[in-house]
Image: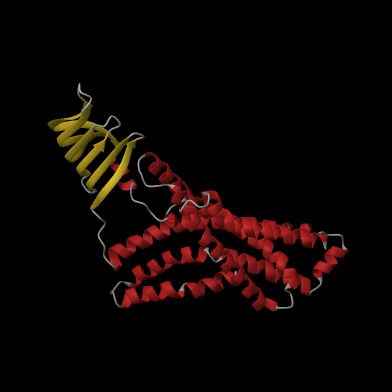
Amino acid sequence: MFGLLGTTLIISLDPMQKAIDYSVKNKVSFEVALEWFLCSVPKDMLFIFPTSCLLAGLLVFAQMSKDSELVAMKAGTISFLSMLKPVLLFSIMVFMGVFYIQDQIIPPALKRRTELFRKHIRQFKVPKYRKNVVMRITNDRLLCIGRIDLKNNILFQLVIQEPNGRVITSSKATIKTAGIWNLENVWSSEVFLTDLEREGEMNHHSKLLAYDLTLNKEDLLKYEMKKPQELSYKEILDQIKYHEQKGVIPTLPLWVDFYSKTAFPFATIIFCFLGACLGISSHRGGGFLGFGISLLLSFLYFVIMGFAMPLGKSGALSPFLAGWMQNLIFLSVTIIIIFKRQSS
């Protein structure tokens, strides 16, 4: 709690200053500025949990080692692995808390913060149009949309590429029933071979054509890519499934974000055990040394994550390895240290 609350107070100084600026300079009400600040804190606080777990293990086991309690336990034939059972219980509790915060608290908090920023602070309007959208209707049909009216669900400047070489263009489309759209001012061109095996082109024009775009109103809103922190685990998987079916946007970055998001809660378990192992040999340094070690190792953890994720999104690493590399490295080091302590 000392590490969590102390570091949170330091990190929250920046959003606190912004909230004060919004209240004074932008004439935003105190209630809105305070709510914006409170919605900003969970995201920053989340990254402090591994550091706090490491610090907790360091301080507790350093004090037990200083008071010779660990020596007494070993004299009573209690192995080092048995000493770590309470650490396991504590780490599981923290893991469940981090998992819940990351999945159920942070996404709605960030969405609410964005809503407050748009409505009250910067007074941004929700975009009514989306331009230059490319979607996959089926595995072999592509749809290009010049402009989407999100308010009225109207599509403009459509180009449909079909597998047989047929290209359909339309100036406007309105939804008729689920998945079926009315295309207006439609031109259809088909390429065919003449008797002399030369390519020819045949064009057709119609004022109105009912066409199955397999799109609903919700699909037009789902196309927008959101930040992983604003999405729960289920929402990220839904985004991946949707873009694999509809969009031509690569889902590799989304997979990396998903694995990274699932890996983070497990870091609290690893850091609890690592802190307990390191606390035995750092009891002479006191709390300040433990706090410094915690910050250094946490910094190294996020540096590895910062290198691995871009490599995964570029395709150099598999999504799982890119998301879990920092966990796997720290887990390996922790296991080695635990077995050394057990054998000593």
Residue 42 image point, x, y percent: 47, 63
Q: Identify which residue is drawn at 25% across, 55% down.
A: 127
Please indicate whether residue 56 sits to the left or right of residue 133 in the image: right
Please indicate whether residue 86 sits to the left or right of residue 36 in the image: right
Question: Is 271 in front, or is 253?
Answer: 253
Q: Identify which residue is drawn at 34% across, 34% down.
A: 140
Query: Which residue is situated farthest in the top direction here?
Result: 195
Residue 158 image point, x, y percent: 21, 41
Residue 244 image point, x, y percent: 40, 41
Question: Is 102 in front, or is 329?
Answer: 329
Please indicate whether residue 327 sits to the left or right of residue 137 in the image: right
Residue 8, placed above or below residue 137: below
Q: How many marks?
A: 0
Which color scheme does this rendered protein use?
secondary structure
Which quadrant, please, contains the C terminus?
bottom right
Which quadrant, please, contains the N terminus?
bottom right
Query: Which residue is situated farthest in the front direction here?
Result: 196
Q: In which quarter of the image is residue 159?
A: top left
Q: Quadrant of residue 118?
A: bottom left
Question: Is 120 in front, or is 335?
Answer: 335
Question: Is 194 in front, or is 30?
Answer: 194
Q: Identify which residue is drawn at 53% across, 49% down.
A: 318
Residue 343 image point, x, y percent: 82, 60
